[in-house]
Amino acid sequence: MDPNGLGHRLQAGESGGFVIFVLLILLLAAALVLLIRLLRLKRQLSRMSRAVGTFLESGDPGGIRLPVYHNESRELSAGLNEWALRWKALNARSQHLDESRKRMLSNLAHDFQTPLAAMLGYVEAVRDDPQLTDAERRAYLEIAARKGEELSRMFRDFFELSKLEADDTPVRLQRVLLNETVPDWLLTFHQELEKLGLEPVLDLPDAPVAVWADARLLERVVNNLLVNALRYGRSGGVIGFSVVSAADVCTLTVWDRGPGIAAGDLPFVFDRLYTGEGSRNRKLSGSGLGLAIAKRLVERQRGRIEVCSVPGERTEFKVILPLAGSQ
C-alpha cells in the first residue's frame, strides 16, 4: 500500500469537505439574507396596506410615503402615492363642484324670487281685477314680460357659469384679428348707446392686432363688460373701448366715467352674485353673474382680467390676452 497515495486522498477529501462546508455556509447566509429581505418586504407590504387603509379613512396621502428597500416596493409605493394624490385632487374637485351646485341652487331660489313674485303679481292683477283699463292691462303685461325676460336671462347666466365651473365649455383658440372683429361687436350696442345718449369712444391701433382667443367667447366677454358699463356708467355720458398691444400681450379696455366702484368692493367684483354696496347704484344692479362669467371666460382663453376705479372719474375693466404672431 502506498502511504503517499492514501495521504493525497485524505487531503483531497478534507479539501472537498471544506469546500462543501464553505458552500453550505454561503447557502445558509444567502438563505438568511433572502429571508430577511422577504420579511422586510412583507413588513413593507403590510405597512403599505395599513397606509392605504388609513388614507381611505382620512384622505391624507402622506401616510403612503414610506421608506423602501427594494426597487419593486419603491415603485409600488410611488404608484400608490401618485394614485392617492390624484384621488385626493379629484375628491377635492368633486367636493368643490358639489358645494358650488348647492350654492347655485340656494342662489337660484333667492335671486329668482323677487322678479318671479313681481311677474306673478302683475299677471294676477290682470286676471282678477275687473277695474283695470285696457291701457293698464297692457302696461301690466309689459312689466310681467320684462320680468319674465329677466328670469330667462338669469337662468341662462346661471347655466353658463355652471358649465364654465365644470369645464364643460369648449374653447377653440385661434388668431382673432381685433381690428376687424371689435367694430362689429360694438355695432350691436349702437341703438342702446343712442337711446341712453352716451358718446362712444373707440381707440383701435392702425396696424392689425391679433390675439390667441376663441372669437365667440371673447365676444361674450366684451358684451358682458359693455353691458356692465351701460348699466352702471351711463351717468358719465361716455363709454370707451380701446386696444393696446405691448411686448407679447394685448390689452382690451372697457371704461366709463360713472360713479365708479368703491375700494372695498374692488376685490370682489368678479365673485358670483356680488353686486356691491358701494358707489354703484344698487337699483341698477343685474344678476351679479356677468363679471363672474367674463372672468372665467378670459381665464379659459389663457388670459386675465383686471379692474381699477377712481369713483366719479374713471372705471376700467382690462382683458389681457397673448398676442398671436403673423403666421
Image (spheres, grey):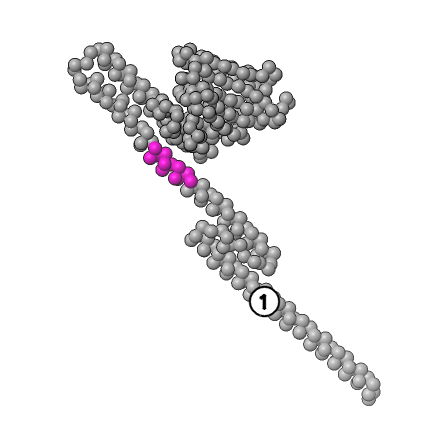
Quadrant position of the C terminus in the picture: top right
Q: In this picture, is 186 found above or below 58?
A: above
Secondary structure state at the residue bearing disc 1: helix
Q: Decide whether residue 210 is among the magenta residues.
A: no
Q: In this picture, is 30 found above or below 310?
A: below
Outermost residue, bottom side: 1
- Between residue 268 and residue 76, name the one nearer to us: 268
Q: Position of residue 233 (x, y in %)?
A: 42, 19
- Between residue 270 and residue 126, name the one nearer to us: 270
Query: Could you tell me what secondary structure mostly forms the magenta stretch?
Result: helix
Q: Position of residue 145 (x, y in %)?
A: 30, 18
* Residue 71 can be seen in this image: yes
Q: Is residue 184 left or right of residue 104?
A: right
- Identify the residue at image location x=43%, y=52%: 58
Q: Position of residue 12 (x, y in %)?
A: 77, 79
- Identify the residue at image location x=46%, y=53%: 55
Instruction: Please give the range of residues in magenta.
Output: 96-107
Q: Position of residue 234 (x, y in %)?
A: 41, 17
The residue that disc 1 covers is: 36
Q: Is residue 286 left or right of residue 130?
A: right
- Identify the residue at image location x=32%, y=29%: 111
Quadrant position of the N terminus in the picture: bottom right
Q: Decide whether residue 101 is among the magenta residues.
A: yes
Q: In this picture, is 91 found above or below 290?
A: below
- Identify the residue at image location x=72%, y=78%: 18
User: Looking at the picture, which amino acid does disc 1 mark?
Assistant: Ile
